[in-house]
Structure formats: C-alpha cells, structure tokens
Image: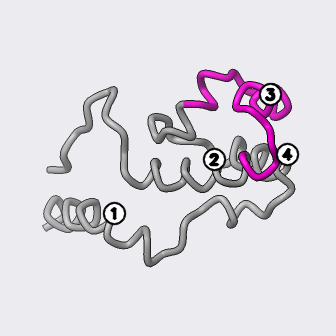
Amino acid sequence: MPKRKEPNERDPVLQAIGKQIRMHREGTGFSQERFALKAGMDRTYYAAIELGYRNVSAKNLIKIASNLKVEVGDLFPKMAELEPLLADVLEDALDSSG
C-alpha cells in the first residue's frame, strides 16, 4: 500500500517542479507576491507550489508558464532528476497491484 504523506510533508517531485518554477520566476525579477498577483493566484497558494507543498493543476501550470513566457515543459525538471524521486512511487504502485 502506498505511503501516505503527512499534510505538511513536501513531496520530492513537487519540490523539484517548484524549484524549476522559482528559478524561472526569479529570472524575471518578480517577487512571489507580485508574480502571484500577475498570474491571478493567492500568494500563499503560489508559495506552497514553489515549496512543493501543493500539487499544481494543469490549468495553473499553464497560467504560470504563460506569465513567465516559457513553455509548460520548461517548468519540469529533466527526467534524469525526476527518475530517482519517482522510484519509490513506482515501487509502491507495483507492490499494490500484484
């Protein structure tokens, strides 16, 4: 059975995505607050995305990418960085299926 995360526990995959988003935002010179306002999001929600506490929806990824003037794919880390983070998730999924 997959391990449940505590509500305040950060997911490593979401942290990696948040890190990419933060890197692009910082490159624009926007503060979190100013960027969240520009993207039409609450600042605390946006900050939680960057920190890996919130699972960002596809719609919000599109809003973020559009306001950063990057492709949505640019907000994701390279697979080489994600694969080790996904290993536990994939192992748990295989264990629970058979």
Of marks 1 and 3, which one's residue comes earlier in the chain? 3
Nearest to viewer (mark 4 / mark 3): 3
Where residue 57 sits: x, y (%)? Answer: 61, 43
Q: CA distance from mark 4 to mark 2?
A: 13 Å
Disc 2 secondary structure class: helix
Q: Is residue 40 above or below residue 61?
A: above
Q: Amino acid at mark 2?
A: Arg
Numbered tag placed on residue 85 in the rendering: 1
Nearest to viewer (mark 4 / mark 2): 2
Nearest to viewer (mark 1 / mark 3): 3
Q: Quadrant of residue 10?
A: top left
Numbered tag placed on residue 22 in the rendering: 2
Badge 3: how crowded within 10 Å, few (<14), some, or many (20+)? few
Q: Residue furthest bottom?
A: 80
Q: CA distance from mark 1 to mark 4?
A: 28 Å
**What residue sits right under mark 3 in the picture?**
34
Q: CA distance from mark 2 to mark 3?
A: 13 Å
In the rendered structure, which segment of residues is drawn in magenta?
26-47
Q: Is residue 80 magenta?
A: no
